[in-house]
Structures are given as C-alpha cells and as structure tokens.
Image: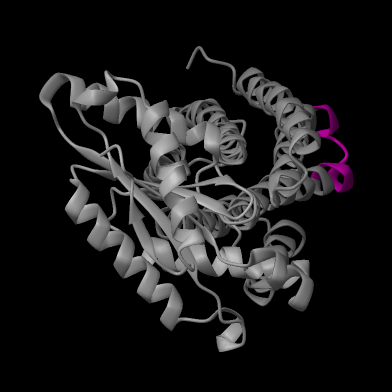
C-alpha cells in the first residue's frame, strides 16, 4: 500500500493534541460541568499513545524497550477510550460505577501484560483491546441516549452515531485481523490503513461532538439564566414580553383573544417577618409550583416583581379567565406551604385584551393592576375583573 502507517499514526496524534487544547480551554471555561477534565485527559493520553507507535521501529534491536513501548502505547490508547466514556457519563450528571470501570481496566491491564511480556501474541492483544473499547462505546451510547437532556438532543445523537460507527469498524477489524494474517500494527496493509483512517476521522468527529455538547449546555444555561427567575423558575419580566407581543400580534391578525391574570401573595411582608425570608422564598416557590400544576401547558407564568406574578392565558376570554383565576385562588387556599405549616392566600386581578386597547398592552396592565388593588381593598383572597374590560 502507498499510505505510510507511521505518518497516519502521527496525524492521529497531532489531531488529538489540537483537540485536547480546545477541550482544556472548555474545562477552564466551564468548570461547573463534570466530566470535561476527564474527557480532556483522554485526548491527551490518546495523542501520546499514537505518537509512541511510529517511534517503536527506532528500538527494533532493543527488545525490552520495544516491549515497554508496545505495552505503554496500547495501555494509553485503551485508557483514553475508558476516560472518554467516563467523561461523557459524568458530563450527563450520572453516577459512575467505579467497580465496573476498575474491573474493566484491570482485565485489560492483566491480559495486556500477559500477551506482551509472557506470550507475544499480536492478534490476542488486539482482540482484548477491541473488546474493551467496544464495551466502552456501547456504554457511552446507552448513557447518551437514555440520560441526555433535551438541550443536548442534537449533539448527543451526533456523538452516539460516532460511537456506533466506531463499533462497526471494531467489528471489521476483529474479523479481518485473523483473515489477513496481520502480524504488526505498523504493517502496511488494508486492515491497518482502515483502522488508522477510521480513528483519525471518528476521533475528530467524536471530540467535535463533545465540544458541541459543552457549547449547547453553556448556551442552554445562559439562556435559562437570562429568561427564568432564579428563585421560582418562572419566566422573568423581560422574557415574558415577547410572548405578550406575540399574543397582541395574533389578536390583531385574527381577533384571537387572550387574557391576563395579575396576582400577589396576601400579607407577604407579615410572612417574611413571622417565618423569616427563607420561608418567604419557599412560599413563592410553592405558589409557582401550584400555579404550574393547575394551568394548561401553553399558559405562561412570569414573576412580575417581588411577590407579584403575571399569567398569560392564550385563546381565553374574560369569563374563562375569571374561572381559572378563582380555581387558582382556591387551590392556594387549600394547599398551605412548607408541608402545611404556612397558610397563605392570594389576590388576583383579571382582564382580557380587546379592540379598545388599539394594540397597546399598557392600558390592560394598568386595568388588571387596579383590579388586583381592588381585591386587596375588598378584603383579599378574591378575584376582581378589570373595569375596562
């Protein structure tokens, strides 16, 4: 064959080194995520392992050094595959079965020592390495498909495909090694060329996929911080505005009604003074949970300010919105917070967007805010409709 195996091995090593630099950068950029450091170490070990192969012929007449390099190269490459899988599992926030991976690594280490130092058998060494890497690939695919977060859907599928392709090439190598009577890794034949070529391509794609996963997770978390209230996980005021604008646009196009509910916790200052601010925070979290459980999936909740919340009810008229608001009021009244220890109620103002607002939301917001104030004046724990609806 015209392709030089040593050169291909150096190319694989160089690619791993370059990718490890990027991964190490991401490790320092996103230290809050587990697994990136372990995965990065895997790329470094892979780079060193593949760099060892082309320098082995330099020691062809020094048997001890040659055996040690053979053992070290194989150990580093297989260890890198184990670390890739562990890094991915930890990045997905899943618990590592340490005993399993220690057992797997020990199995490879013992068999590698035997087939390098006691019984020099190239085929056996490769079969053990193939089996170990295949187990790691299968585990990685399982965790990527079972425990992936919705924000990582594309990148986890991408990496899973690379692991699957790697399994196919491993199977091909396991079948072809005995058939082709290959005696050495640097032997220039089709089996070794395909192996090095597939490693070069699939390692690059897998590492790129992992970088994609980290990037997607960073974007998701930043977007979450920018749009959700940190305490209640309801939308914040800024994030709610585009949904309100969209509802107005739908009304202007097709007269599709929508309603708003503004509510806040009655005597919230008294709750803070009596139970402490940590329990006040718990009440707001409890309130948000009850609201989410009793609204439709397309209804939206935002923390409008302090203990005040705004609810958007798409395709809902005033009478329906009033019924929804009253049901929410009763649910809160019947479900005290802090395991039933903190009894509290809410007051609500409700209104529906109509033609008189001329496409401007401010008047409706003022109207339901005044309705909420009126509910407070009337004795709290009640729903009042906005007068301008």
In depth, the one of 374 and 329 nearer the eye is 374
Q: Is 60 included in the stretch rendered in magenta?
A: yes
Q: What residue do we see at 56% from left, 81% from top?
A: 343
How far across and how far down the image is residue 29, in percent? 77, 33
In which quarter of the view is residue 173 placed? top left
| Magenta stretch: helix, strand or loop mostly | helix
Q: Is 120 included in the stretch rendered in magenta?
A: no
Q: Is residue 81 left or right of residue 246?
A: right
State whether residue 279 is above or below residue 307.
Answer: below
Q: What residue do we see at 65% from left, 51% from top?
A: 87
Q: Is residue 231 left or right of residue 220?
A: right
How far across and how far down the image is residue 361, in percent? 37, 27
Q: What residue do we see at 64% from left, 50% from top?
A: 306
Quarter containing the C terminus = top left
State whether residue 250 is above or below residue 285.
Answer: above
In depth, the one of 234 and 334 nearer the eye is 334
Magenta stretch: give its range.
Answer: 58-66
How far across and how far down the image is residue 272, in percent? 74, 69
Q: Is residue 2 left or right of residue 63?
A: left
């Amino acid at each position: 064959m015209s392709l030089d195996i040593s050169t291909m091995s150096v190319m694989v090593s160089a690619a791993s080194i370059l990718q490890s630099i990027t991964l190490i950068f991401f490790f320092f950029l996103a230290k809050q995520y587990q697994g990136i450091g372990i995965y990065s170490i895997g790329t470094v070990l892979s780079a060193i392992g593949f760099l060892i192969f082309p320098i082995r012929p330099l020691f062809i007449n020094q048997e001890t050094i040659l055996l040690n390099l053979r053992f070290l190269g194989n150990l580093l490459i297989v260890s890198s595959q184990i670390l890739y899988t562990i890094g991915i599992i930890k990045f997905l926030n899943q618990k590592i079965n340490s005993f399993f991976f220690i057992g797997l690594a020990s199995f490879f280490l013992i068999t590698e020592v035997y087939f390098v130092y006691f019984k020099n058998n190239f085929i056996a060494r490769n079969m053990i390495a193939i089996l170990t890497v295949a187990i790691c690939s299968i585990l990685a695919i399982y965790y990527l498909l079972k425990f992936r977060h919705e924000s990582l859907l594309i990148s986890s599928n991408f990496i899973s495909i690379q692991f699957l392709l790697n399994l196919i090439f491993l199977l091909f190598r396991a079948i072809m090694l005995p058939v082709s009577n290959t005696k050495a890794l640097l032997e220039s034949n089709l089996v070794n060329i395909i192996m090095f070529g597939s490693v070069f391509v699939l390692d690059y794609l897998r590492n790129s996929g992992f970088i994609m996963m980290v990037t997607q997770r960073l974007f998701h978390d930043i977007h979450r911080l920018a749009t959700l209230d940190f305490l209640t996980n309801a939308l914040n005021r800024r994030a709610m505005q585009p949904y309100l604008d969209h509802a107005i646009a739908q009304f202007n196009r097709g007269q599709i009604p929508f309603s708003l509910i503004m509510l806040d916790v009655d005597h919230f200052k008294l709750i803070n003074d009596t139970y402490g601010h940590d329990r006040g925070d718990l009440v707001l979290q409890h309130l948000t949970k009850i609201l989410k459980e009793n609204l439709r999936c397309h209804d939206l909740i935002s923390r409008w300010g302090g203990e005040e919340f705004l609810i958007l009810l798409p395709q809902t008229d005033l009478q329906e919105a009033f019924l929804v608001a009253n049901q929410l009021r009763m649910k809160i009244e019947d479900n005290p917070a802090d395991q039933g220890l903190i009894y509290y109620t809410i007051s609500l103002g409700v209104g529906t967007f109509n033609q008189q607002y001329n496409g401007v939301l401010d008047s409706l917001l003022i109207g339901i805010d005044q309705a909420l104030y009126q509910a407070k004046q009337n004795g709290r724990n009640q729903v009042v409709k906005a007068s301008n609806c």
